Each structure stands twice: as C-alpha cells, then as structure tokens.
Image (spheres, grey):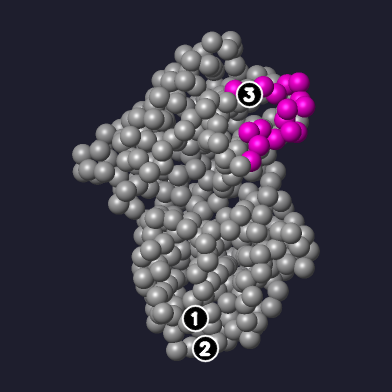
Amino acid sequence: MRFLFVFDIGFDRGGPSVHLLQDILRSALEEGHAVKVILKKTNGPDKEMPDEFLANPNFHYHIIDEKTNKKSGFISRYIDEIKYAKKCAGLFLSDGRFDAVFLQSNVITYFYMKQLKKLDCRIVYNVQDIFPYNLKLSGQLPLAKITFPIFRKLQNAGYKMADKIITISDDMKQTLVDDGVESDKIEVVYNWSYADTPIRLETIDPENVFDLHLDHNKFNVVYAGNIGKMQNVELIAKAAREMEEDESIHFYIIGDGANKRDVEQIANGLKNVTMLPMQPVRYAESIYAQADLNVIPLMLGGIRTALPSKTATVLRVNKPMAFCIDGETEIEKLMGKIDGVYFCDCCDTTSVKSLLQKLMRVNSGDINRNKLAFLSVANCNQYIKCMVG
C-alpha cells in the first residue's frame, strides 16, 4: 500500500514526538509499504531525515522550509499553520493516489481534512493533545469566550472527516466522546518510550549521563521537563516551600518554559530546591534514573486533554513515580495497580506532602517493574493496522 504522512513538525529540531513518528515510519517500511512524508524544515541542529530512511527505495519525502516565529501571538501562528497546510495540500494533491493518510496532531484539523478528503483514501488522525481545550484550560487561548466555540466547532468538523482517530489515553478518548466524536472511531494507543528495556543508571553510556550531584542521604524528588502552563510545576515548588525545614528531602526542578519565572519566585531562597535549565534529550534517562521519586504534575483538567510523553520513559526507571493530577481518572485505574506508581491531588500541596512523607519513611529500593505491554514500542504497529483498515 502507498501511505502519506503529513507532519507539522520537523525532524531537525528534536522533540517528544520525533521518536514516535520515526518508529511508525520504520514499522510501515518494514511491512513493505511505500511511504511519502511531508514535514517542516525548522532549521534545528539535527538531521532533516534519519539516514535509515534515505536508503530505503520505498521512502520519499518533501520538506517545506518554515521559519515560524514562536514569539508571535497565537492567532498569527494559527494563520501560519493554515498557510503551511495549503503548501502541504499543493504537494499531496499533485502526487497521485494514496491508500491511506496519517495526519499528525495539529490545531487546524479541519483545514487539513478538507484537502485530504479530495484524495479519496483512508484518513487516520493522531490526537496527541486536544485543542482548543488544552489552551483554554491553561489560559492561553485569546478571547476564549468567543474563540473557543469557533475552534471547537472546526476541530469537531475535522474529526468527522477522519476514518480513524488515534489518541494516547483513555481519559482523552472520553473527552472526545463527550464532545460528540463516535466512540467506535477512536483507538487508544499509549505513547511508548525509546526502548522497552529497563533504565538503570549504571548501564547508561557515560556521555549520556548528566550528574545531578545529589546527596544520597536525602530523599531526592525530580521534576524534569517543560515548565509551561499545563505542567503545574508550581505545585512542586509550593510543596518544597512548605517542607523547607525538613532537611531529609531535596527537590530538583529541571527545565524551561513560560511559567519558569513563576516557579523561580516560589522557590526563591529555598535551600531544598535546585533549579536547572532544560537538558538535552540524551540526558533524560539518566536524570530520571537518579531520582528517588519522579513527579509528573498537571493542572486541573490537564490529564483529560493530554498525557505527558515522558510517562513511558519514567515508567522504565526502577524508581517510584507520582502523578499529581485530577481524581477519578482512567489513567489512575490503569496505572494505579503498577508497582511504585502513586497519585496525589493536583490542587492540594497537603496531598503531595503526605505522599512524600510516606515514601521517605519506606525505603522501597529498586522496583522490579517489568515493561508494560500497553507502553511497548510495538505499539507503533497499531498505527499501521489502523491505516491498513
């Protein structure tokens, strides 16, 4: 079969979705399908396309040079995305027949779908986060009372034109169903990590180790990732402030983002907090492996619109981890039974402190957490099955 993949990102600038997309492409090629990819050139430091694909005669790609100004307002970026979608359409509409199309998560679904329907083939849409709910929740949607209903209607119109929708958690599926999307059309495929093997610090190549210089006599809590409006890292900083007098615990907050200054203000002067800038992706596994506890906080409602892509990687580490999210979620039902996975209230520092104090009293040691099937790299094959139909 002949597959078209339409991405609104570039492989030259690393990000949390790049390894997922590469695994999906690899799976399609290994099954013998012909693959055409349209993606952006964003002038990042990495290669525009991995060498492994370039050597395959069934692989073809086209890069559109896009110099998006991330500092511009949302509406300007939205218009830029529409312009990029039109450039994509100009390419795939003149490129003959495809048997199936994979469309990556984006904020202008309707505009892509309207053009893709002209190809008269199966369309699979991957929802990595749910727009415009994510921006409304985080307060980033301009004139939300006016724009939210408009964007929501446009996205829903796009969903209706898809033959299959893949999203990355059961909570996100429920959000789409509650918004009128047919349940039978939605497939849940959880994002996987870079590999299925357990992460142990002693087995990581030295060049991929970022030494936190932590005190092993203390209980070390680590948050590493984006410090944006959805992540609610302020909760961790507030918990640190309330536990300032406890010398047996230390917090590491590693990352950058729109809310970093707010987090810095909360943590200002605290001796039990170390703040570090965002580190290269190659250090991620070593950072998680040094923690006594990795935390994944989200703002209230956030888990219903997105699932942090680092979840699968953190679960590969043989250390405890904690979600700070809404109560009564599908993710808690699924992961609450996993050894060393804990949940606390994203709106209550007392809940966070209680969990930390509990874990500090119990030296859990290494957790023999086997790789879970629903987070396996083999999940990429489910995308190909959805495209084949």
Q: Position of residue 247 (x, y in %)?
A: 52, 88
Q: CA distance from mark 3 to mark 2?
A: 55 Å
Q: CA distance from mark 2 to mark 1?
A: 7 Å
Which residue is depicted at the point 65% across and 59% down? 283
Q: Which residue is mark 3?
A: 61
Which residue is depicted at the point 41% across and 62% down? 260
Q: Are discs 3 and 1 less than 8 Å apart at CB?
A: no
Q: Disc 3 on helix, strand or loop?
A: strand
Image quadrant for the C terminus? top right
Tell me, for residue 272, which label it has, or none: 1
Relative horizontal placement of residue 88, taking residue 81 as reference (left or right): right
Sequence-earlier tag: 2 or 1: 2
Relative horizontal placement of residue 162, taking residue 134 as reference (left or right): right
Task: Give the vertical position of 40 relative to 226 (above or below).
Answer: above
Relative horizontal placement of residue 339, taking residue 57 as reference (left or right): left
Image quadrant for the N terminus? top right
Q: Disc 2 on helix, strand or loop?
A: loop
Q: CA distance from mark 3 to mark 1?
A: 49 Å
Q: Are discs 2 and 1 less than 8 Å apart at CB?
A: yes
The magenta stretch is: 46-62
Residue 389 magenta: no
Q: Which residue is mark 2?
A: 247
Residue type (three-letter) at the residue carrying disc 2: Glu
* Quarter of image, res 243: bottom left
Sequence-earlier tag: 3 or 1: 3
Tell me, for residue 234, which label it has, or none: none
Neighbor class of circle 2 (other Cα within 10 Å; few <14, some 14-19, many 20+) is few
